[in-house]
């Protein structure tokens, strides 16, 4: 494996024309993909030959090349030339024409344009692509970004996401229509109180809560399902206590050591975040969260719901939501960070400081528009687009329809408002 690593480094220097560079550092990191596979990445930093060696805390000089490669496949994940400067002896891309760049990307990634990725933005020396399958969008979506400088040199390539093979897709023909999902559309209309900075007011709006609907209309998948890519253990427990505690809580700084050894790379060691949270760990974490709340929020018994637990590096993260019914778009949230070894709380993050921003806003509660009236105004602006969504139970992407709407209705006066304008 060490020979393979050295071969990767040598091949990287030759492939990208880094004759005028020298290797500054190399390191490994690992991550999880949506299929819960552990991906090992080799990161190399190359300094221009004319640049002096930099200390650990110094900024990289202009032209520094930072390149990420999948260790086990040799696939390029990203390349960045600092400050949009490149001192490579040859152009990595043939030209800056979109056609030539796409052809280079296909050769570099093994992906096929319009089948696995599509161009969605172009201009000012930048191209941005989104993942697709046979021209249909994918969720969660991968992306590829390309940048080049005025001299026509590639200065950024970044591929994020899965871009899985065809075998991961359960191919289907879109069968949904707005007529078929009309009843469901009505149920997705929600009242949301939104802060308007210019007016310093919190106003009520009716909008459609985005959702994925399976192509066979048998079930729905919440849009927020893929917001967090952690492997979460659902708890959904309201935390009560009889009395506060006299003990005080002291925060401890977090350490994120990510020193991956060559032995871990060779053995393809599974990511530690995949380690299941046992029943005993779960119960201890619930107790730990309760003790933390008794210390820091002594008067809040019954006011917090422990939603999930998940592993991240050396810690177990406990996510909590405030136990209240509120239409305000921003909800009170709390994150308690627990040491994975002794299962004691060591740090926390509360978004109350962000919510305090809106304390000076005037909240308008009076509504002159009903939910049905709002739906009548929104129904002609509903959008239903086919999309392949990853189904964890099937370990496949299945065809769905994404129900969405780019407008909302001001509940105080019935005005139709673009969401982007909010």
Image (cartoon, helix red, strand yellow):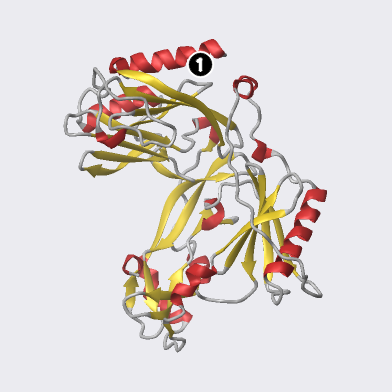
Q: What crowding class fits label 1: few (fewer than 14 Cα within 10 Å), some (14-19), or many (20 or more)?
A: some
**Is residue 176 among what the camera can see?**
no
In this rendered view, identify the residue nearer to me: 383 or 84.
84
Percent x, y of residue 378? 38, 72
Tell whether 237 sits left or right of 181.
right
Q: Nearer the viewer, residue 87 or 408?
A: 87
The image shows residue 300, relative to residue 401, as above or below, that is below
- Residue 202 position in % (x across, y down): 42, 79
Is residue 392 depicted above or below 98 in this figure? below
Question: Outermost residue toward the left?
Answer: 150
Q: Which is nearer the eye, 367 or 152?
A: 152
> Which quadrant would the C terminus be assigned to in this image?
bottom left
Near-viewer residue (140 or 380): 140
Residue at figure coordinates x 65%, y 44% from the top left? 393
The answer to whether residue 288 of the structure is visible from this angle is yes
Q: Residue at x 49, y 36 (%)?
A: 162
Q: Residue 312 at x, y = what percent? A: 62, 45
Residue 102 coordinates in the image, percent (x, y): 29, 30
On the picture, is 330 further left or further right than 289? left
Where residue 390 sits, quadrant-wise, is top right
Q: Residue at x 41, y 13 (%)?
A: 10
Q: Look at the numbered disc 1 and give the secondary structure of its residue.
A: helix
Report the side of 404 relative to 247 (left or right): left
Q: Residue 420 falls in which quadrant of the image?
A: bottom left
Q: Residue tagged by mark 1?
A: 5
């Amino acid at each position: 494996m060490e020979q393979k690593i050295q071969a990767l480094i040598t091949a990287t220097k030759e492939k990208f024309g880094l004759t005028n560079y020298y290797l500054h550092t190399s390191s490994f990191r690992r991550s999880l993909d949506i299929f819960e596979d552990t991906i090992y990445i080799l990161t190399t930093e190359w300094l221009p030959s004319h640049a002096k060696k930099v200390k650990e805390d110094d900024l990289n000089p202009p032209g520094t090349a930072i390149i990420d490669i999948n260790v086990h496949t040799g696939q390029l994940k990203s390349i960045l030339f600092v400050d949009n400067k490149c001192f490579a002896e040859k152009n990595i891309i043939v030209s800056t024409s979109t056609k030539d760049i796409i052809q280079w990307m296909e050769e570099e990634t093994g992906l096929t344009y319009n089948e696995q990725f599509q161009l969605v933005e172009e201009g000012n020396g930048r191209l941005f692509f989104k993942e697709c399958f046979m021209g249909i969008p994918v969720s969660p979506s991968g992306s590829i970004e390309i940048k080049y400088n005025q001299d026509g040199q590639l200065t950024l390539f970044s591929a994020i996401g899965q871009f899985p093979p065809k075998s991961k897709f359960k191919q289907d023909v879109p069968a949904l229509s707005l007529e078929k999902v009309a009843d469901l559309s009505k149920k997705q209309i929600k009242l949301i109180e939104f802060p308007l900075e210019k007016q310093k007011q919190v106003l009520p709006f009716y909008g459609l809560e985005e959702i994925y609907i399976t192509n066979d209309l048998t079930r729905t998948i919440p849009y927020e399902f893929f917001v967090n890519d952690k492997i979460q253990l659902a708890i959904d427990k309201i935390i009560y206590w009889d009395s506060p505690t006299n003990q005080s809580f002291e925060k401890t700084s977090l350490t994120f050591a990510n020193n991956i050894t060559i032995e871990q790379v060779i053995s393809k060691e599974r990511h530690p975040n995949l380690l299941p949270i046992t029943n005993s760990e779960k119960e201890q974490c619930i107790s730990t969260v309760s003790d933390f709340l008794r210390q820091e929020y002594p008067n809040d018994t019954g006011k917090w719901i422990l939603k999930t637990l998940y592993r991240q590096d050396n810690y177990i993260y406990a996510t909590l939501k405030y136990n209240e019914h509120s239409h305000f778009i921003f909800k009170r949230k709390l994150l308690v960070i627990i040491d994975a070894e002794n299962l004691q709380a060591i740090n926390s993050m509360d978004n109350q400081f962000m919510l305090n921003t809106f304390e000076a806003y005037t909240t308008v509660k009076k509504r002159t528009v009903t939910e049905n009236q709002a739906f009548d105004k929104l129904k002609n602006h509903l959008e239903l687009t086919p999309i392949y969504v990853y189904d964890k139970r099937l370990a496949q992407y299945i065809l769905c329809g994404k129900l969405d709407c780019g407008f909302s209705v001001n509940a105080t006066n019935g005005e139709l408002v673009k969401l982007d304008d909010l």
